[in-house]
Each structure stands twice: as C-alpha cells, then as structure tokens.
Image: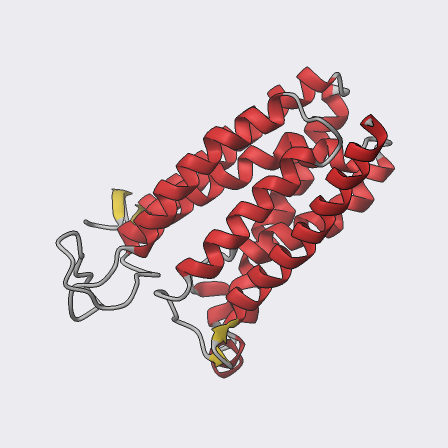
Amino acid sequence: MNPVAFSIGSLDIYWYGILVATAFLIGYLNTLHNTKRYGLDSDLVQDLLFKLCIAVIIGARLGVIVVNLEYYLANPLHMLTRAGLGSHGAIITAMVLGYFWVKKANLSYWTMADAIAPSISIGHIFVRLGNFINGELYGSPTALPWAVEFPYSGQPVHPAQIYETLISGIILIFALKWARKPKYPGYAFFRVMLVHSIVRFFIDFIRQHSSLIGPFVLTQIIALGFTVVLTIHLFRIESRRRKEQQ
C-alpha cells in the first residue's frame, strides 16, 4: 500500500499522519466526554488536553530517539527529519508533565488519568495501522498463511502491527467500560496500562528491531517494569478495598 494518501502540489500527505491526527481527535473527544461525566470543569480540561497533546508528540519522538540512541547519535539530523513515534515516551512524558499541569489546575490527577485511559488504546490502534501502511515495525519471518511481505522485509513476516491493532481494539472495549464509572481514581488507567504493557512485552519478542539488552529489547524492559509496578500497586489497592468492605 502506498504510504502517501494524496499530494497537494509537491506536498505529500501520508496515511500515517492522517491516522495519528485521527487518533488525537477521537482521543480528545472521548476524554472530554469522560471529564464531563465526572463533572470536571470543561475550560480547565480543554486547556490541559491541549498541553498534553504537545507533551505526547514530544515524548513520543523522544521515545524513538532513546530506543535507537546509537543510530541518532551517528545521524543527529535524523532526530528532526526521520519519522517515528514511541508509545512509552509519549505516556511517560504525559504522566510527568501532566502531574504538574493537573495539580496547577486543581484537578484530580488519577481522575484525569481515568478519563484519558481509553485514548491510550485508541492511539495504539491508529498508530499501528500507520506502521503497517508504512511497512515498519513488522515481525520476524514466518510461513503462516497471513504472513505479509513488506518492501524492506525481504520475506514474509508476522504482521505484528496488525496483531497489536486487533488486541488494542479488544482492550479499548474494556477501557471504555472501566472509564465510564471508575471504582476509584486510577481504576481505568492502571488497568489499561497494565494490559497494554503485558501485550507490548510479548509482541516485542517477534518485533525485535532494537539492540538486545540481555534477552530483551529496551521497550520490553520498560513494559516489564510497568507490569511489575502496576501489578503490585493494583494488588495493594484491591486488598485494601476488600478489607475496608469487610
């Protein structure tokens, strides 16, 4: 499939950019809908979401650079000219900067995180579709009947992008349910992050395009770290809630 959707004169408009923009729009509208349901101030939320969108873009770019640091140090101009976004960088940057912005706006940090939670799945769906169209982030060689040969793969490979797209679609169904009526602040966000981290850890076994650190790539180590921390945190919260309800 041609990565270029259409051209305006000499300017090429890529499907990847269209899909990323669509993800931002749907995520923004869904988050705004959730915050209205939670009774949060719409003006404060819209200002916060605008800042978070910028943080996500910057963080996503930094995420790619950090994972492929050796390449970008050797080709520094490509930091600005080469395409690519990293979900971990986007999430971590938004969480860190969002903490200060949310507190300044006098809003609940974890309540806002719940409102945003479905957007994580939405982002994965559209970005991975863009990766598929671009012929990037594919998996290892396979003879399975649904294998795909991309321009640079040299042979049929796992369409890892489609695997993650489909799984993210399933997660989104639960994310929307969790975010509709969170049982406590952070309820939806913790669960969405945990499930996506587990999925990312296993998907990257067939999508190792970065240097190995021991048996794993860096994104797997980050995903494993999120998984461990979130599992322990959720266990503690749920245990405390059960004791309080007894």
Q: Is residue 34 in sight in this rendering? A: yes
Counting from the top left corner in percent of width and height, residue 224 is at 58, 62
Q: How is the image coloured?
A: secondary structure
Task: Judge from the rendering whether residue 200 lies leftward or rightward of residue 88; answer left or right.
Answer: left
Count the numbered circles shown: 0
The quadrant in which residue 44 appears is: top right
Compare residues 231 and 122 and report the one nearer the observer: 231
Compare residues 73 and 184 and report the one nearer the observer: 184
Which residue is pictured at 30% across the width and 63% down the height?
139
Is the residue 204 above or below the residue 186 in the image?
Answer: below
Task: Judge from the rendering whether residue 216 lies leftward or rightward of residue 235; answer left or right.
Answer: left
The quadrant in which residue 167 appears is: top left
Which residue is pictured at 67% across the width and 16% down the height?
37
Counting from the top left corner in percent of width and height, residue 28 is at 57, 30
Which residue is pictured at 16% across the width and 58% down the height?
144
Q: Is residue 93 in sight in this rendering? A: no
Say which quadrant the C terminus sits in: top right
Q: Report the residue that reaches farthest toward the front.
A: 246
Counting from the top left corner in percent of width and height, residue 160 is at 32, 56
Which residue is pictured at 68% across the width and 40% down the height?
51
Compare residues 19 and 67 and report the one nearer the observer: 67
Counting from the top left corner in percent of width and height, residue 201 is at 48, 60
Is the residue 202 above or below the residue 33 in the image?
Answer: below
Task: Judge from the rendering whether residue 138 lies leftward or rightward of residue 209; answer left or right.
Answer: left
